[in-house]
């Protein structure tokens, strides 16, 4: 599978798209706390990003399939991401941060069209590989965003990370204007076909399991591990490093999951291994004697996610024709939005009621539950690719 110009361009568009949303993420929890938000409100602010995705990814996927267009949705998504970053830069109250993250969630809805357009550039046989590659692009953008955000916070202030996010979004918007629609002929799905799509067993299984993958990643890795680092008086660069270290394995290994591991070991084995690693990473946090231990736990979280999530994404569309994939991807991403919101919200609620350490152990239990679900409900695929 060789990369060509449209794929390379969209790879970078996708990376800048995620930079717009993630540059300030390492600093958002403590920034919100300093703005007067309670610990439960911090979870709501950071998790609210998932609400718009739950509500709108499926309708926008349906509309995209109906119009047979992806590019306008991508351009609009990046523009909304720029607006959300500027809103939080100029107005820093807890209510404004909540509104800004809701807008960021609306922006993230465009990832449906991004993934479908990227995979449409490849033959259907290479769907797991292409989706692993686009997930790797997402993680690479997030990693770069966190590095740049850490530098901006250290040189200027944490507030300036919102401004940097908007500037990076402008670059992404300019690049996106040169992207090409797929020339594949598509027939809009009928109501009956949409219903059949949403009842597809592999899609439902992948979507439900993805809720937990995202809940652990957001609740543990992006929100409450940085807060746990406050015990060690972490600097802005160290807090940025915490989120970078969970993203680095995702950037490095997501494409490997789709191109090598799923074809060799099968989706069930790869996803199960990923959830087990996520569980281990959560259980590590209460025993942390130093920030270096937290760094290690973040790497394990990222490795687990890099195994589970690309495998589940490929599984979600594995049984569906091209013309129904934006609908399926919209459903998949809408459902896993529950994890994006629910992970931080639940972890915040548990931290406030039972304490930080028990909250991390409960997250570990959820990941173990997902590992059991992967073993029970994903069909064995032997050592063959999901898509032939």
Image (cartoon, rainbow, N blue to C red):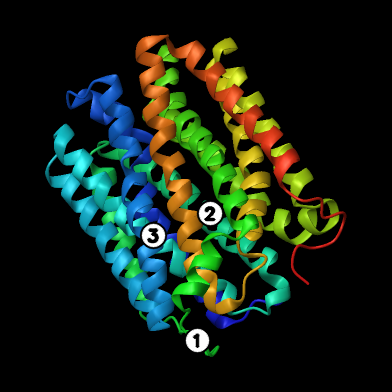
Q: Residues within 10 Å of mark 2 (few under 14, many from 20)?
A: many
Separation of residues labelled 2 and 1 (CA atoms): 34 Å
Estimate the spatial distance between the alpha carbons at disc 2 and disc 3, rounded to whole Å: 23 Å
Location of residue 64 with respect to 361 vertically, above or below? below
Quadrant for residue 112, please give it: bottom left
The picture places residue 173, in percent across and down from the top left corner, at: 33, 70
Q: Does the residue at mark 2 contact the one at mark 1 (Cβ under 8 Å)?
A: no
Q: What number is the disc on residue 20?
A: none
Determine whether the residue tagged by mark 1 lies in a helix, strand or loop. Answer: loop
Is the N terminus in the top left, top right, bottom left or bottom right quadrant? bottom right
Q: Residue at x 26, y 26 (%)?
A: 41
Element type at marker 3?
A: helix
Q: Which residue is mark 2?
A: 140
Q: Is residue 322 left or right of residue 236?
A: right
For discs 2 and 3, the disc positioned in front in the rendered view: 3
User: Which callout, 2 or 3, points at the residue further toward the start of the chain?
Assistant: 3
Is residue 17 positioned above or below 186 on the image? above
């Amino acid at each position: 599978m060789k990369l060509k110009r449209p794929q390379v361009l969209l790879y970078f568009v996708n990376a800048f798209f995620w930079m717009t949303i993630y540059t300030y993420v390492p600093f958002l929890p403590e920034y919100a706390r300093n703005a007067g938000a309670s610990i439960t409100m911090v979870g709501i602010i950071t998790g609210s990003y998932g609400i718009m995705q739950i509500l709108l990814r499926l309708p926008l996927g349906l509309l995209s399939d109906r119009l047979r267009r992806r590019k306008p949705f991508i351009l609009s998504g990046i523009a909304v991401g720029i607006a959300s970053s500027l809103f939080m830069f100029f107005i820093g109250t807890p209510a404004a941060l909540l509104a800004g993250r809701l807008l960021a969630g609306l922006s993230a809805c465009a990832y449906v069209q991004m993934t479908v357009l990227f995979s449409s550039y490849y033959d259907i046989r290479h769907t797991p590989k292409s989706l692993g590659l686009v997930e790797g692009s997402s993680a690479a953008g997030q990693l770069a965003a966190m590095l740049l955000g850490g530098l901006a916070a250290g040189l200027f202030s944490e507030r300036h990370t919102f401004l940097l996010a908007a500037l990076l979004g402008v670059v992404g918007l300019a690049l996106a204007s040169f992207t090409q629609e797929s020339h594949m002929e598509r027939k809009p799905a009928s109501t009956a076909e949409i219903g059949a799509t949403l009842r597809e067993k592999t899609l439902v299984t992948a979507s439900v399991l993805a809720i937990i993958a995202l809940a652990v990643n957001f609740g543990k890795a992006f929100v409450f591990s940085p807060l746990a680092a406050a015990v060690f008086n972490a600097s802005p660069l160290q807090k940025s490093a915490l989120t970078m270290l969970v993203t680095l394995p995702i950037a490095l290994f997501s494409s490997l999951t789709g191109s090598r591991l799923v074809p060799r070991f099968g989706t069930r084995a790869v996803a199960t291994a990923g959830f087990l690693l996520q569980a281990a990473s959560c259980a590590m946090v209460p025993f942390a004697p130093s920030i270096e231990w937290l760094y290690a736990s973040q790497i394990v979280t990222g490795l687990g996610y890099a195994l589970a999530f690309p495998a589940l994404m490929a599984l979600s569309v594995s049984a569906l024709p091209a013309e129904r994939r934006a609908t399926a991807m919209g459903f998949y991403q809408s459902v896993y939005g529950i994890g994006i919101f629910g992970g931080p919200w639940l972890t915040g609620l548990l931290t406030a009621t039972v304490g930080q350490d028990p909250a991390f152990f409960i997250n570990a239990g959820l990941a173990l539950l997902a590992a059991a679900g992967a073993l029970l409900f994903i069909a064995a695929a032997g050592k063959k690719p999901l898509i032939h």
